[in-house]
Every structure is written in C-alpha cells, then in structure tokens.
C-alpha cells in the first residue's frame, strides 16, 4: 500500500522547498507597477541581496532562470571572439561553456572530470601561457550541481593574481548561494550569479547577477549589449521599470522579500552552519549505508562536497528504482543523476541526487533519510546498518 498521501517533499537540487511565508506573500492582488509600494519594495531588496552574496557592489535582478544569468553575465563583459577559460567539474561547467560559445566567445575548457574539484595550478598555468592576455574571464562553478563538487573559489583568485593576469573571475553560485559559504568581495570574485529557486527559496523565475568594479569597467569595453540584457540600467535605474527591462516580476518580488526576511532573520552565518550540519548528517548516513552495500557518494573527500546537493551512485538500475519507490510509496522526490552517464543509457539509471538547499531543517532531513532507508529495504538493495542513528548523532550535536 502506498503511504505517499500527505505533504510531498521535493529533494531535488532545485526548485527547493518554498517556505509558507513565501507562498503567502505571493498570494495577493496585483500591485501598481509604476509607483507606490513596489518602488520601496524593490529598493529594499537590493541591499538585502548584496548581503546574501556578501558584496558591497552591484546587484541586478533578471526575469529568467539560471541559464538567463549565465548569458547575462557573459554578454556584459565578453565581445564575440574574446577568449574565456572555463574550469569544468561536471555538466554545469560544460553548460556555461556552451552558453559562452553561443554568445560568440572563444572557449577553452579545462576539464577536471566528474570526481575531483578544479586544480587552481592548471588555471594559473593556462593564464601564464596566455602572454597576450587574450583570456577575458575565468568561469568557475562554485558548486557543480551534477557532480556535487564544491570548488575552492579563492584558490582561483590566487591563481589569477599569481599569474599577474587581468582576467575577470566569474562564479556560478546558482546551486550554492545561501547553502555553501560564499563571500564575493572577500574572495575577489568579479561577477557572481544565482537564481531564485535554490538557496533563495523562491519559485523559479528570477536570476541575479552581482558585479564588482572591474566587471563594471569591462562592460565599458564591450561594443554592444542588447538592451534587455544590459546590466547598466538595471544597476542604475532611473525609474522602477529599468530594474527589470519592463514590467516587474511582481509576485516573485513579494516572495523574495519574504525569503530575504527569513534568511537575514536567521543570519547568513547561521544559514551556512545549518546547511553544514544537515549535510554532515546526510553524509554520515551515506557512509553507513555504503558499509554494507553499493551506495557511494560521488565526492569522496568531504572537503570537496557541497552542502546544497549530494550526487550518489547505486549502480545497475537501482538509482531509478529507489527514486520511483520513494516518490510513489512515500511522497519523496529525489533528483535524477545528471551528466554522470549518457542520458537514457542503462548506466544512467544507477545514479541519483539529493537536493538539500534552502528551507530545510533537521526533521525534513531525517525524514528524507528515513524514507531512503525504507526504500533500500523495500527494494532489497543491500545497505549497511546504523545510518539513521549516525545521522541523528550529527543532528544531536548541532
Ligand atoms: C540550476 C543550475 C543552473 C541552471 O539553472 P536553471 O534555472 O535550471 O536555468 C546553472 N548552474 C548551476 C550550478 C545550477 O545549479
């Protein structure tokens, strides 16, 4: 008998859980988009967004998903034909590289595979080899959502500086922001991007581009940016519609206001610490399951694991079977494996992911883990004992 009736839980790496306060804030009549409360609402969002990215510089909002800000970030600083260097640690690195090629950049990909973080020395070597300084930007995924690899962004800043190279440092924080610690200014990041539907707890539909002074200067050297994607009016708007290149995404903004209130009410340090504890509880459970069966985390070294998403393998078709069981029998949706094997191949069915970004607390994490344990048991997938008590110990320690 299915036990799925009740509130479902989506544990995929975005969209994440939406807080009731966010949903309630969106449930209202449409406001005037030209004057009144909407103006003060938007003006208040900008400094609070800066606090999430830990920057004093520009914060812009686009109506679009992560792919939209992949593109927005590029077109403001890259002319067709300019070189960009991409550090790929999974499918999302290749995705951003593809987007760069699509806007006419000459893309060089450093592929670090699917198991290891980027190696900043290789980036430094590539920049040193670029004696004419043709590379305009280095693109890095803070977290690659497919592999769940966490990259060391400050090491890339150090590599760029050691090579004495003027390239911009661009960080994709779509998965990681407000889950894994990220400090844009302190880490010397020139451009950071994120989306609304992951750590920021708002439905998909908003993208954010943060940029510092060097990026602002680079924008002046770009011959032409189509008006919609140009970050200039968005960052220095003369009137409210310039924030968005047209009509405001009204209800998303109400939701975002509520989400930022939740985040800053908790405090960024506490948000990061909560995700750290919850991720360690998950890893402890996975370690225990793996002792007596095929379950393995994709990233062996905890220092290189994200606190927003965990990529796992069970082999065979066990990843698919577990996902199906959890959804149909228990109301829990786990993420598909992405980029670990060709889409639709037999091998792809062995992978899955657990999203743990955003509005997540101890009981939701323990419920997710308990459900996975039930699924492994129901499907006769061998697994080690003690996973739930290992997770509970981490939670109990805070
Ligand atoms: C989700 C994600 C994207 C793509 O975002 P969409 O909203 O799906 O377009 C890009 N990069 C990373 C790291 C992501 O997690």
Image (cartoon, grey):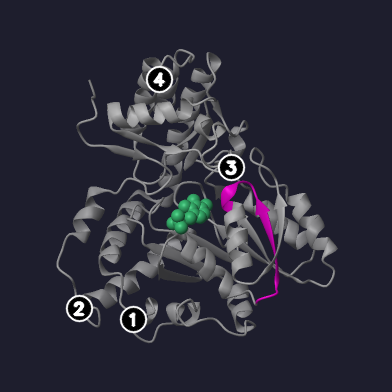
Mark 2 lies on residue: 32
Q: Give the percent coordinates (x, y) of residue 268.
A: 42, 51
Is label 3 or label 4 in front? 3
Q: Nearer the viewer, residue 90 or 41?
A: 90
Identify whether 347 is placed above or below 61. above
Residue name at image x 41 percent, y 46 percent: 271
Residue sitting nearer the eye, 113 or 319: 319
Quickly name the residue at label 1: 241
Of marks 2 and 4, which one's residue comes earlier in the chain?
Answer: 2
Question: What secondary structure is marked by label 1?
Answer: helix
List the residue tagged with mark 4.
388
Q: Residue at x 49, y 26 (%)?
A: 317
* Ligand 1 under 8 Å from disc 3 Cβ: no
Q: Magenta stretch?
A: 80-92
Instruction: Point out the tag, 3 or 2, that comes first from the N-terminus.
Output: 2
- Which residue matches tag 3? 149
Q: Looking at this view, is 283 or 187 the one in front?
A: 283
Q: Quadrant of the C terminus?
A: top left
Q: Which of pointers 1 and 4 lies earlier in the amino acid sequence?
A: 1
Q: Quadrant of the N terminus?
A: top left
Q: Earlier in the sequence, mark 3 or mark 1?
A: 3
**Mark 2 vs mark 1, CA separation in Å:** 12 Å
Q: Secondary structure at mark 4?
A: helix
State the CA–CA distance, disc 3 to disc 2.
Answer: 43 Å
Q: Is residue 20 above or below residue 369?
A: below
CB under 8 Å between discs 1 and 4: no
Residue sitting at the far left: 29
């Amino acid at each position: 008998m299915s036990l799925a009736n009740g509130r479902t839980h989506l544990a995929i790496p975005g969209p994440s859980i939406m807080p009731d306060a966010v949903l309630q804030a969106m449930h209202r009549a449409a406001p005037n988009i030209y004057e009144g409360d909407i103006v003060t609402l938007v003006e208040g969002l900008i400094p609070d967004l800066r606090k999430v990215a830990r920057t004093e510089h520009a914060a812009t909002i686009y109506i679009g998903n992560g792919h939209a800000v992949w593109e927005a970030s590029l077109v403001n600083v890259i002319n067709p034909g300019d070189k960009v260097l991409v550090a790929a640690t999974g499918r999302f690195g290749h995705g951003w590289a593809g987007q760069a090629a699509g806007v006419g950049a000459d893309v060089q990909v450093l592929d670090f595979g699917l198991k290891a973080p980027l190696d900043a020395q290789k980036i430094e070597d590539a920049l040193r080899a670029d004696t004419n300084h043709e590379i305009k930007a280095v693109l890095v995924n803070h977290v690659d959502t497919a592999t769940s690899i966490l990259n060391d962004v400050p090491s890339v800043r150090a590599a760029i500086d050691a090579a004495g190279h003027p390239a911009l440092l661009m960080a994709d924080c779509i998965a990681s922001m407000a889950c894994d610690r990220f400090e844009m200014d302190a880490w010397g990041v020139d451009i950071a991007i994120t989306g609304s539907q992951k750590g920021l707890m708002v439905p998909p539909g908003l993208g954010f581009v943060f940029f510092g002074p060097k990026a602002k200067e680079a924008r002046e050297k770009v011959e032409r940016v189509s008006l919609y994607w140009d970050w200039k009016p968005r960052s220095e708007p003369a009137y409210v519609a310039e924030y968005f290149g047209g009509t405001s995404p009204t209800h998303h903004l109400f939701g975002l206001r509520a989400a930022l209130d939740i985040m800053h009410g908790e405090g960024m340090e506490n948000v990061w610490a909560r995700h750290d504890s919850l991720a360690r509880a998950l890893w402890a459970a996975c370690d225990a399951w793996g002792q007596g069966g095929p379950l393995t985390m994709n990233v062996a070294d905890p220092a290189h694991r994200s606190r927003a998403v965990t990529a796992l393998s069970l082999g065979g078709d066990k990843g698919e079977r577990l996902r199906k069981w959890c959804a149909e029998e228990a109301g829990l949706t786990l993420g598909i494996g992405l980029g670990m094997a060709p889409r639709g191949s037999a091998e792809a069915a062995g992978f899955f992911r657990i999203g743990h970004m955003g509005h997540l607390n101890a009981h939701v994490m323990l419920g997710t883990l308990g459900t996975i344990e039930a699924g492994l048991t129901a499907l006769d997938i061998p697994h080690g004992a003690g996973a739930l008590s290992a997770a509970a110990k981490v939670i109990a320690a805070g």
